[in-house]
Amino acid sequence: MKVTGSHNHLKTLEHIPMFSCMLPDEKSRLNQIITEKLFKKNSIILMEDDSKNFMYIVFSGKIKVVRISADGKEQILVIRKRGDFFGEMTLLDGKSQPATIIAMEDATVGLISKNDFEQYFMKDTNVLKQIISMLCERLRESWIMLRVLGLPDAETRVRAVLTHISSIYGIKDVRGIIIPFKLTHKEIADFASLARETVSRLLTRLSHSGEIEIIDGKNIILKPSFLNTK
C-alpha cells in the first residue's frame, strides 16, 4: 500500500550515518523522493530470492530478516526497527535478496530506487565510506549468529541471543540493559533455533533467578548478574 502525502522523516535519516554525512540540500531532496509503504503485521515485505530495485528504510514498526527451511520453519537472522535499513546489497551487487523480510508489527517503510541510490550514494566519497563500514558491521552480525547456532546447549544459545540483541539495541539503565522492544518467546526461539517451550522454560528460570526482568510483559531487562555471567 503506497502512502500519499508522506511524512517528513529527516529526523530518522539524520540518525543513519550514510544519510547524516550528506549535505543538507541532498538530504532534503532525498526525503522528498522516498516512497512510503505500509505493511501490516506478519505481511511479507520481500521474498527470499526476489530481485528488487529498492533499498528499504524502516520508519516505524519492527521487521525481521529470516531464512525459511524446506519444512517452513523460520530462522531469524536479525531484527530491524526504526532507523534501520535493508536491501542495499541487491543494489550494490545486482544479485537477488538472500532472505525473506517480514513485518513483525505494523510498519512504515521508505523505498529508495536503484537510480536514486546510485545518484545520491555512489558518487559521494563520504557516503561510500559509511557504506563500507555498514557492510563490515553486517558481516560481523552474520558471524555472531553463526557462532550462536554452533553453541552446544539451549541455555547458552538463549543467553547469547539476548546478549547479541542487547549489544545492538540495548539501552543502559540503573537496573541493567533494557531491550527496548517486545520479543516474544517464539521470536527468541526462532533466533536460537529452539522450541518455543524450551525458551519459555529458560526465560522463566532466568527471571526467577533474578538475572532478567520482564516489564509489563514486554521489555526484557538484562540484570548485572546476567551480564556478569561468563
Image (spheres, rainbow, N blue to C red):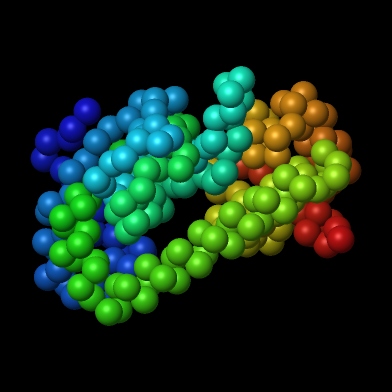
Q: Which residue is more in the foreground, 121 or 51? A: 51
Please tell me which residue is depicted at 72% across the width and 49% down the height of the picture. 148
x and y percentages locating residue 7 in the rendered image: 19, 46
x and y percentages locating residue 176 in the rendered image: 71, 58
x and y percentages locating residue 211 in the rendered image: 82, 48
Question: Height in image: 103 above or below 35?
Answer: above
Q: Name the quadrant of the N terminus.
A: top left
Please tell me which residue is depicted at 86% across the width and 58% down the height of the picture. 229
Q: Name the quadrant of the C terminus.
A: bottom right
Looking at this rendering, what residue extends furthest in the bottom direction? 125
Res 218 visible: no
Q: 57 left or right of 133?
A: left
Please tell me which residue is depicted at 70% across the width and 39% down the height of the picture. 192
Res 80 visible: yes
Q: 224 left or right of 123?
A: right
Question: Height in image: 117 above or below 214?
Answer: below
Question: Height in image: 86 above or below 208?
Answer: below
Figure quadrant of residue 43? top left
x and y percentages locating residue 98 in the rendered image: 46, 43
Figure quadrant of residue 52? top left
Question: Height in image: 152 above or below 116?
Answer: above
Q: Which residue is more in the foreground, 104 or 206? A: 104
Looking at this rendering, what residue extends furthest in the top direction? 71
